[in-house]
Image: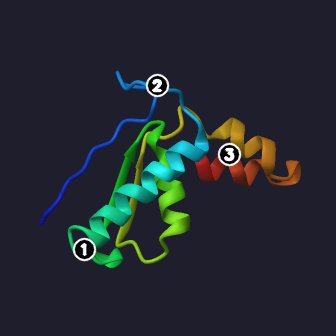
Amino acid sequence: MIRFLFESRIQGFGGSTGTPYPQNDAAAVAAVIDYAKHELGFTESQIVVYAWSIGGFDATVAGSAYKELKGLYLDATFDDVMPLADNVMPKALAPITVKTIR
């Protein structure tokens, strides 16, 4: 059951004003989660973070900063993750990387 739902928009995207900077996004995520914990009375283990598209950055920041979150859902955060994987995975593992991702 959803007891509280909060939507935010990254600065400079989706009609939001401002300029996007990672440190601002990280601070905004912390403010939202801290508000849910300290003002609304949620425990960290009751909070689920859902992110779509570029919001995946913010959600990943939340997941790394708040280890007890109940859930972290990333939806369509990359157009194609294969180029990213190609860049960081050893070339000898390319067939396994492709099979895993595709």
**Visible in this render: residue 33?**
yes
Which quadrant of the view contains residue 102?
A: top right
Indicate the secondary structure of the residue bearing disc 3: helix
Which quadrant of the view contains residue 55?
A: top left
- Horizontal and vertical percent for residue 53? 44, 36
Residue where numbered disc 2 is placed: 12
Quadrant of the image containing the N terminus: bottom left
Residue where numbered disc 3 is placed: 98
Q: Any mark on residue 30, and which?
A: none
Q: Residue furthest top?
A: 15
Q: Is residue 11 above or below residue 96?
A: above
Mark closer to the observer (3, 1): 1
Mark closer to the observer (2, 3): 2
Residue type, label 1: Phe
Q: Residue furthest front?
A: 39
Label located before the other in sequence (2 or 3): 2
Q: Nearer the viewer, residue 46 or 102?
A: 46
Label located before the other in sequence (3 or 1): 1
Residue type, label 2: Gly
Q: Nearer the viewer, residue 25 or 72?
A: 25
Q: Any mark on residue 42, and which?
A: 1
| Mark 2 surroundings within 10 Å by alpha-carbon count, few (fewer than 14), some (14 through 19), many (20 or more) | few
- Horizontal and vertical percent for residue 65? 53, 67
> Disc 2 and disc 3: Cα gap in Å?
34 Å
* Dots 2, 3 in contact, CB < 8 A: no
**Visible in this render: residue 102?**
no
Q: Residue at x 35, y 56 (%)?
A: 32
Left or right: residue 90 versus residue 102 is right
Left or right: residue 67 versus residue 90 is left
- Horizontal and vertical percent for residue 62? 48, 60
